[in-house]
Image (cartoon, helix red, strand yellow):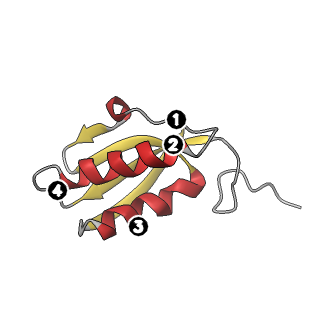
Amino acid sequence: MASAVGTPADYSNALYRVYVEVGESDFIARDAITAFLVERSADHPAFHFVPEALLARDHGYELDLPMQLIPEVVRALAAANVAVYQVRRLGPA
């Protein structure tokens, strides 16, 4: 059986560097990502998020995430009415 590492079936504790391109105004995306990940890290024993780890880029943010939290971050942004233009996995953290 093939390894699930680096695939959507990756439920490991491995972290991946992710870039999220968003339509940002008034730091709504930053605040939505931060609030979601601070709350989520409280109940995810292998993942600890600190707001300073969220790096602002010209049109989005970079951060380290476990594979299974990537779609959850997108859902949190959608719930905050933030347009997501792309999500790119940049490689292992």
In the picture of the structure, the residue carrying the numbered disc 4 is: 24
Residue holding disc 3: 75
Looking at the image, is mark 4 or mark 2 nearer the viewer?
2
SS category of the residue bearing label 2: helix
**87 horizontally vs 80: left or right:** right
Mark 4: which amino acid? Answer: Glu
| Circle 1 residue | 48
Cα gap from disc 4 to disc 2, whole angstroms: 24 Å
Q: Badge 1 local density, few (<14 within 10 Å), some, or many (20+)?
A: some
The quadrant in which the N terminus is found is bottom right
Which residue is more in the foreground, 9 or 47?
A: 47
Helix, strand or loop at mark 4: loop
The alpha-carbon separation of the residues under discs 1 and 3 comes to 19 Å
**Disc 4 and disc 3 in contact, CB within 8 angstroms:** no
**Residue type at numbered disc 1:** His
Separation (CA) of disc 3 from disc 2 = 16 Å
Q: Are marks 1 and 3 in contact (CB under 8 Å)?
A: no
Tell me which amino acid carries mark 2.
Answer: Ser
Q: Amino acid at mark 3?
A: Arg
Labels 3 & 2 near each other (Cβ < 8 A): no
How far is the residue under mark 4 from the one under mark 3? 16 Å
